[in-house]
Amino acid sequence: MDTEIVCLGIIAVEKATGYDIRKFVEEGPFSHFYAAEYGSIYPALKRLLDKGFISCDLIEQEGKPSKKLYSITSEGKIHLIQQLAQSDPKKDKVRSDFCFILFFAELLASDHIDDLIDNRLSHYDEKIKKMEEDDLSDAPQGAKFVHGLGLAIYKAAANYIQENATKLNE
Amino acid sequence: MDTEIVCLGIIAVEKATGYDIRKFVEEGPFSHFYAAEYGSIYPALKRLLDKGFISCDLIEQEGKPSKKLYSITSEGKIHLIQQLAQSDPKKDKVRSDFCFILFFAELLASDHIDDLIDNRLSHYDEKIKKMEEDDLSDAPQGAKFVHGLGLAIYKAAANYIQENATKLNE
DNA sequence: ATAACCATGTAAATGGTTACATGATTAG
DNA sequence: CTAATCATGTAACCATTTACATGGTTAT
């Protein structure tokens, strides 16, 4: 599941530009389980276009730069479904500097620990608030499920940190 | 926080070989927030040695291949603390094929969804069981905190999936 | 016999981020 | 006037995985 297939998936949800895709992974429905920068998105779109999995419409706009709106083709849909159906999803990859640093709490100043905890908690608060405001009434079950899972994890993490952070400063 | 500093951190916890470090990130205390293969560990150890942050003892063993046991030096300790203290931990990186695939549940066969869910739940069960068996009585507060956070997240995820998976098959 | 464990290491390939390059419009 | 948003793209760089190379021991 690399940037290429993730771009195809997003375009399958709705027509999108490279810029839209970035927002999708940065702030949107994929933000809690995927990340990608322009530097990997634009080349991926080019490859998908070359393979015939997406098509491109150039949209001219007033007061804004022109954009390339990509749509999925029928071959693209077939390819996406095939990729989704291959039943060996790679195991999750997580890399958390936060956990690594706090593992060594004994080597840190209390003030620094407090900062890390505070930042993390306000980060979760923001995320949770945003996600709770999302309107999913029209979203398909899969999107709802994944959204709920992300929310459940954020809440559990925030809760655990709130209840156990004091133990780090003694 | 790359493989180099993570290796240094592990060696700071206790003397270790490259092989030990792999186990640490694969099954040990770092397994829920970091990953690394031999291909990045061994070169990182060489760099740490060149920089004088670790020292190496060659241990000959009967019936087993000789091993290189690395220890942290005083310069290494200083470097580790400096790295930990720089207060801008990068935000967590997560990549989950599981979430990506289930986002598109509508495009999948029910049987396939069931398989994905079952595998994921038994994976969590194993992880949770192992972590609950870990003896942390002698572990420092930081290690306990991070361990507890990982456990809380796994439990919340497993719980959410158990309670909501049926909605995906309708 | 055969797989798993112990143990180290390199080279090629992969995949990604960061920095650069460009530029108009709008909101504070 | 300054920052943010819209919008696309490339090139250099970076980090990591995968595959290869080696080989004895132990448990099934």
Image (spheres, coloured by chain):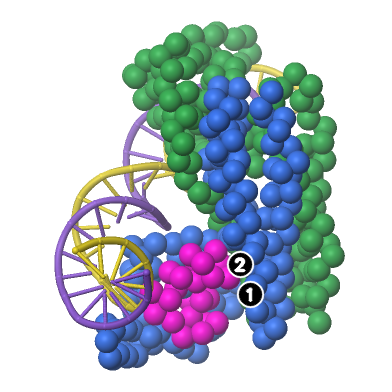
Chain colours: A green, B blue, C yellow, D purple
Horizontally, residue A165 falls left or right of residue A15, namely right
The x, y position of residue A29, in whole percent, is 66, 32
The x, y position of residue B156, in whole percent, is 74, 52
Magenta span includes B14 = yes
Please tell me whether residue A142 is drawn above or below residue A104 in the rendered image.
Answer: above
Which chain is mark 1 on? B
* Residue at image coords 83%, 62%: A162
Q: Which residue is mark 2?
A: B130
> What numbered label is drawn on residue A84?
none
Residue situated in front as seen by the camera: A149 or B78:
A149
- Quadrant in the rendering for residue B144: bottom right
Alpha-carbon distance for marks 2 and 1? 7 Å
- Quadrant in the rendering for residue A158: bottom right
Q: Amino acid at mark 1?
A: Asp
| CB-based contact (under 8 Å), mark 2 and mark 1 | yes
Magenta span includes B153 = no
Please tell me whether residue A127 is drawn above or below residue B129 in the rendered image.
Answer: above
